[in-house]
Amino acid sequence: MPNHSEIYRLEPEQYDLLISKQPNLLERIQCIHNLEGQDVIDLGAGTGRLTVPIAQQAKSVLALDASEAMLRVTAKKLKNANLNNWNIRVSDHRKIQAEDNSADVLVSGWSICYIGSSNVHGWKENVAATINEIKRVLRPGGTVIKFETLGTGVEFPSPPDFLTGYYSMLEKVYNFQNTWIRTDYQFDNLDEAERLTKFFFGTDISEKVVREKRTTLPECAGIWWRSF
């Protein structure tokens, strides 16, 4: 399995190309909370897959990520879109670099899972600390919306074993509502599908793509949300 931390640090543009093959999720967010006139934090913003469309709708957006390299890509995309209602900061989920009661909405896409994995020592404490920080930065009644993986290469939810504890905490301890969607990758051709899936998911997925001649790679994602 490729080292995602190294990818985020050294190859953010290639990662951005991969996720550009997935659908825009703005409509999903808007169905949960209307972003018009809202101050938004994107926690684990990466290369801006959520930040850029959110900035086109919201009053302001603060993009936070542990990888400065990823945030540079986000900033470039926001500038190219002629947007000026944004800011970026390097930040840890367990100590969010934002003021108390500074956001109406906080979104997080495929990010908290990295410290909420049962493969990580202290994962329960990580989740608890992150939730407490989210509560701190949200205004009263503010909404948090999280996207996390429910499996790549599958047509129905099949969450990794190392994330089921985290997901259970969200639902049973913190009372999040949840649903799931498909976030399939649509590649231009088989060569691109093989190259990009091997880059991020490793040989098991890329070999399956080649074997089955797939230019569409199915993926499932969970959405968890609640207001505080």
Image (cartoon, helix red, strand yellow):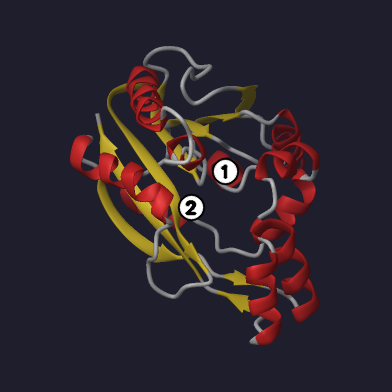
**Residue drawn at 66 percent across, 45 percent down:** 4
Q: From the viewer's perspective, is the residue at label 2 or at label 1 nearer?
A: 2
Circle 1 packing at 10 Å, graded few (<14), some (14-19), many (20+), is some
Question: Mark 1 highlights which residue?
Answer: 56
For marks 2 and 1, give the CA distance. 10 Å
Circle 2 packing at 10 Å, graded few (<14), some (14-19), many (20+), is some
In this picture, is 164 found above or below 192? above
Asked which secondary structure carries label 2, the reply is helix
> For the residue marked with disc 2, what is the amino acid?
Leu
**Residue drawn at 53 percent across, 29 percent down:** 60
Could you tell me residue 45's position as x and y percent? 58, 37
In this picture, is 159 found above or below 84? below
Asked which secondary structure carries label 1, the reply is loop
Marks 2 and 1 close (CB-CB < 8 Å): yes
Could you tell me residue 43's position as x and y percent? 51, 33
Question: Mark 2 highlights which residue?
Answer: 26
**Residue drawn at 37 percent across, 30 percent down:** 127
> For the residue marked with disc 1, what is the amino acid?
Gln
